[in-house]
């Protein structure tokens, strides 16, 4: 079979060669493109003749899938796969795999980092102290003793809950299915309305699906305490970000730490969160650590190897 890595994975070429060696030793062909592209025609060309493609978080549209007659597996070096046209893949009986678990430490750590920034005014303080007329220090708050609402208690949400607990937070959560591991941390499950209303800190960890798009709606945001903050390291469209910006600017909630948006950065200049008060914005870097990049490369090559052995793993469109 022909396996094609369509873009760099932020690890060394030496590591790619090492990971590809077992595939090549089995008699398969491996092709590596060391420059990223989002051009549909170029993606078609790169995908031509491939049985397995490895991509990251750039769009992989229907037109490319429909033109790839030999494709059997879209191997995504990312947790979310909403940038792949799932219907087109299903129509051609093409499997989609993800790199589940690679960012299980990096994303939760960023959620904590954003919380500390919002609570302690680190970004605002950095800007203030550089001013000639320093306005004085910002009085912050502590995580200890706060009620932490975890929206989505999969791997990432549960790990984030564990970190919040280490700071002394009390855990509540919402998820379609209750997870025993989260309960063992002391998290108690409630409906979404209750979690939104009772939390001091809300941390969002839902995948983007038809059911979750806009689930943190204007109505849900209106249930938050005036002193509450919300952290989103999941997917931007899970939240109504226009409503979130309005709530921040009206002082209806106290702050937000946001790593994901309705589109990938750079953001349009009129994007509502750019002018929202007490909002700390990160450029979608929750997944992006040296350690996570090594782990995701290992996972996607393991996915390819397992698929070639007829033992597929991490398939998300069964």
Image (cartoon, grey):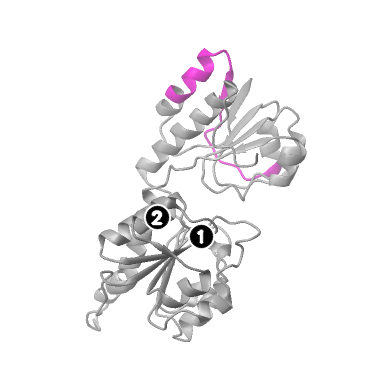
Instruction: Indicate whether residue 20 is drawn in magenta.
Output: yes
Q: Quadrant of the N terminus?
A: top right
Most extreme residue toward the bottom is 250
Nearest the viewer among 179 and 104 is 179
Q: Which of marks 2 and 1 is nearer the N terminus?
A: 1
User: Percent position (x, y) of residue 70?
Assistant: 72, 27
Circles 2, 1 touching at the beta carbon (< 8 Å): yes
Instruction: Indicate whether residue 31 is drawn in magenta.
Output: yes
Nearest the viewer among 233 and 216 is 216
User: Percent position (x, y) of residue 185?
Assistant: 34, 56
The part of the image, by quadrant, that contains residue 312 is top right
According to the image, label 2 marks what residue?
Answer: 182
User: Mark 2 packing: few (<14 Cα in 10 Å), some, or many (20+)?
Assistant: many
Residue 175 disc label: 1
Q: How far apart are marks 2 and 1 (CA)?
A: 10 Å
Nearest the viewer among 110 and 213 is 213
User: Percent position (x, y) of residue 190?
Assistant: 47, 68
Residue numbers of the magenta segment: 18-40
User: Percent position (x, y) of residue 83?
Assistant: 62, 49
The part of the image, by quadrant, that contains residue 200 is bottom left
**Vertical relation: 111 (above or below) 98:** below
User: Mark 1 packing: few (<14 Cα in 10 Å), some, or many (20+)?
Assistant: some
Q: Quadrant of the C terminus?
A: top right
Q: In what element is the residue under mark 2?
A: helix
Q: Residue 267, can we see it?
A: yes
Q: In what element is the residue under mark 1?
A: loop
**Vertical relation: 111 (above or below) 122:** above
Nearest the viewer among 182 and 163 is 182
Residue 168 lies left or right of residue 307; in this view the side is left
Which residue is depicted at the point 70% across and 25% down?
49
Which residue is depicted at the point 26% across and 59% down?
166
């Amino acid at each position: 079979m022909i396996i094609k890595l369509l873009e760099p994975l932020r690890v060394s070429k030496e590591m790619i060669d090492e990971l590809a060696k077992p595939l090549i030793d089995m008699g398969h062909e491996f092709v590596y493109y060391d420059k990223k592209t989002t051009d549909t025609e170029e993606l078609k060309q790169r995908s031509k003749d491939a049985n397995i493609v490895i991509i990251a978080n750039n769009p992989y549209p229907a037109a490319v899938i429909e033109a790839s007659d030999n494709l059997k597996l879209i191997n995504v070096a990312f947790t979310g796969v909403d940038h792949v046209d799932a219907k087109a893949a299903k129509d051609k009986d093409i499997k989609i795999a993800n790199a589940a678990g690679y960012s299980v430490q990096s994303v939760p750590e960023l959620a904590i980092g954003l919380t500390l920034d919002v609570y302690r005014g680190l970004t605002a303080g950095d800007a203030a102290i550089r001013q000639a007329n320093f306005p004085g220090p910002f009085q912050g708050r502590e995580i200890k003793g706060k009620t932490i609402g975890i929206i989505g208690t999969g791997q990432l949400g549960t790990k984030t809950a564990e970190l919040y607990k280490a700071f002394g937070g009390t855990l509540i959560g919402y998820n379609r299915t209750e997870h025993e591991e989260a309960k063992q941390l002391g998290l108690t499950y409630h409906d979404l309305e209750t979690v939104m209303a009772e939390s001091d800190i809300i941390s969002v960890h839902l995948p983007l699906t038809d059911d979750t798009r806009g689930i943190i709606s204007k109505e849900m945001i209106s249930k938050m305490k005036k002193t509450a903050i919300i952290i989103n390291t999941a997917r931007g469209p899970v939240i109504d970000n226009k409503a979130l910006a309005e709530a921040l600017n009206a002082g209806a909630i106290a702050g937000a730490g946001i790593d994901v948006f309705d589109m990938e950065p750079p953001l349009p200049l009129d994007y509502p969160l750019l002018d929202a008060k007490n909002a700390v914005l990160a450029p979608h870097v929750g997944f992006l650590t040296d350690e996570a990049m090594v782990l995701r490369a290992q996972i996607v090559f393991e996915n390819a190897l397992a698929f070639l052995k007829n033992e597929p793993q991490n398939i998300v469109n069964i």
